[in-house]
Every structure is written in C-alpha cells, then in structure tokens.
Image: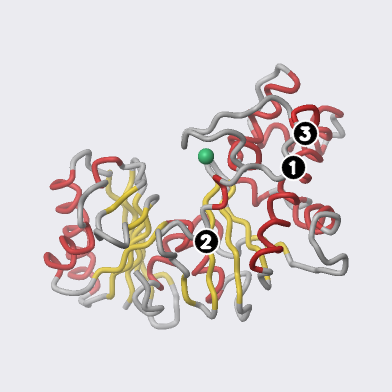
C-alpha cells in the first residue's frame, strides 16, 4: 500500500493507492499553523488511515518547497513554519520508517512520467501553470532534484527575449527579480497581463470564455500567452530536449493551447524540424498527490 500526501496552505490531503495504483481512500485535514501541531496532524492522519485500512503503507509527501541538500532542512515552503525544520527526520522518527519528501511540482512530473500523459517517455519536463509556475524534470522515471534542489524552477528564469514594446511593462516577481517567466504564463500572470494591457480585470477562465466567443481582446491576450509559453518552452528544449512536456494546473484546461504552443515553438527552437509533444496532464489536480505516493518506489527524496 502506498500513501501520498499533499501539503497545502489550508489542507493536508492523503490518498491511499493499492498495488494497481487504484485510489482507495482520500482524507483531508486542515493545515495547522505551527510546526509541532503540523507534525502531529500528519502522523495522526497516517496512523488513523492505516488503522482504518488495516495496513502499513509507504509514505511520500509533496509540498511547495524543497529540502536543502546540505542541511536536510525545508526551504522555500509557502507554509513558512516548515522552513528550517528537518521534517523528513522528524516524521521518519515518529512513523518508524523512511518518509520521502519532494517538491509538489516534482511529484506532479513523476506521476505523469510514470503512468500519466508521458508514460513510457524517457525525459519528461512537467509544468504546473496555476497560481505559480512550478516545474520538474524526470529522467527514466527518476526525479532530478539537483545540487541545490531547484531543478525545474525555470519559472524564475527571465522571459526569453523580453521586449518592453512587445511584452508590456516590466514585471517584478516576489523572488526579487524582474520579468520571471511565472509573471507571464502562470494563470495569475496571464490575468495580470490582460489587466495591464486592457485596464480591465478578468479571471483566466473568463478570458478563455471570451476567447471562445470571438472577443478581440481575449484573442490578443491568448496569442500573446501562446507566444510567451512557446518562448519559455523553447529554452527548455534547447537545453534538455525532453521527449514530452506535460502541463497541469488551471491553464492546462485550455484545450487549444497544446497545438498552438507546439506550432509557435518551431520558430524558437534551434532545430527547425523539432517536434516536442506538449501534453495535458492525465491525472489533473490529483497528479501531485499521486506522484508523492510514487516517491518511495522511485528511490528519491
Ligand atoms: Zn521570480
């Protein structure tokens, strides 16, 4: 039995999978606001579920942060009370087994590379286009974490070929840099681009609805988004040339994006004949927690 946990700002979710990767149960509890309560909540959630299912499970956890390779302490987590703690050691001690932890975008990519949209592909780059723009890289069904545990954090590279006249005003990012890719192609970035260009606030789904109704402003915003994603993906292709790029998160529901981005990328990738499939995540919102459940079997942390 495999348990995957997804740590969010408001909820901790656990899903249990059997040996056929069938989901057996889903449990949620609120995320506590301090570290000791958080550890207790995770331990209780796991032990209660194990009691209910009369089983012992392997444990993998995905969270929006990373484990510092030098200190083993959590860093970059948006649940800020986790930062600076050795969560892996503390949970492993309490649960009497090794607990595996990885960044949630990495878990998403692992899930899609193992038995999701990119099953059978050797090199898979995964991207979650939602509030932010997380990424992960899986090679031969193994996560690449990186020497600094920031592999896949391409959302904080600058938008390639940023041009003020073409791409609008300079965008400050919370990371302290300017014009990060995330500020343009995440759902939030897309909305901000629209709002600054047309002085009108619309949510990403509203803009896409307008696009489908033939709205001119929505069309301009959409084709600019396609171009921004194509430029950003082309840089990834020129460096690692993945067998597929998988998109998850809210923006992954825009069906036309896949073909349009594939077509637009051709002018930016070094080889004119390149073909990199851009795929929609198979498991949608549950891909992160599924990937977390895969962590122990894939021998990563
Ligand atoms: Zn940034």
Q: Mark 3 highlights which residue? A: 221
The residues bearing labels 3 and 1 have C-alpha atoms spaced at a distance of 18 Å
Q: What secondary structure is marked by label 2?
A: strand
Q: Earlier in the sequence, mark 3 or mark 1?
A: 1
Say which mark, if any, is on residue 161.
Answer: 1
Residue at (18% x, 67% y) in the render:
92
Instruction: Estimate the x, y position of residue 79 in percent, counting from the top left.
Output: 31, 42
Q: Is residue 71 above or below residue 161?
A: below
Quadrant (top left, top right, bottom left, bottom right) of the N terminus: bottom left
Say which mark, if any, is on residue 15.
Answer: none
Circles 3 and 2, Cβ within 8 Å, touching? The answer is no
Q: What secondary structure is marked by label 3?
A: helix
The mark lying in front, picked from 2 and 1, is 1
Task: Give the residue furthest to the top.
Answer: 199
The residues bearing labels 2 and 1 have C-alpha atoms spaced at a distance of 23 Å
Residue at (38% x, 69% y) in the render:
293
Q: Would the CB of label 3 be found within 8 Å of ligand 1?
A: no
């Amino acid at each position: 039995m495999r348990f995957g946990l997804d740590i969010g700002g408001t909820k901790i979710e656990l899903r249990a999978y059997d040996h056929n990767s069938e989901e057996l149960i889903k449990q949620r509890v609120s995320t506590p606001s301090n570290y000791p309560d958080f550890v207790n909540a995770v331990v209780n959630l796991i032990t209660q579920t194990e009691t209910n299912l009369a089983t012992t499970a392997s444990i993998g956890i995905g969270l929006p942060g990373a484990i510092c390779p030098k200190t083993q302490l959590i860093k970059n987590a948006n649940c800020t009370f986790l930062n600076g703690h050795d969560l892996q050691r503390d949970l492993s001690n309490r649960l009497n087994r090794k607990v595996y932890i990885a960044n949630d975008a990495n878990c998403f990519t692992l899930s899609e590379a193992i038995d999701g949209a990119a099953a059978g592909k050797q090199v898979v780059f995964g991207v979650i286009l939602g509030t932010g723009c997380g990424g992960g890289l899986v090679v031969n069904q193994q996560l690449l974490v990186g020497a600094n545990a920031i592999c896949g954090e391409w959302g904080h590279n600058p938008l390639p070929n940023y041009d003020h006249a073409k791409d609008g005003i300079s965008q400050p990012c919370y990371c302290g840099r300017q014009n990060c890719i995330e500020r343009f192609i995440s759902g939030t970035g897309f909305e901000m681009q629209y709002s600054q260009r047309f002085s009108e606030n619309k949510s990403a789904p509203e803009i896409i609805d307008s696009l489908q109704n033939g709205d001119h402003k929505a069309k301009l915003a959409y084709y600019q988004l396609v171009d921004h994603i194509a430029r950003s993906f082309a840089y990834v292709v020129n460096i690692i040339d993945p067998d597929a790029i998988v998109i998850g998160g809210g923006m992954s529901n825009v069906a036309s994006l896949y073909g349009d981005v594939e077509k637009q990328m051709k002018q930016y990738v070094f080889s004119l004949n390149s073909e990199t499939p851009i795929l929609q995540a198979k498991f949608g919102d549950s891909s992160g927690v599924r990937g977390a459940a895969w962590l122990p079997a894939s021998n990563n942390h």
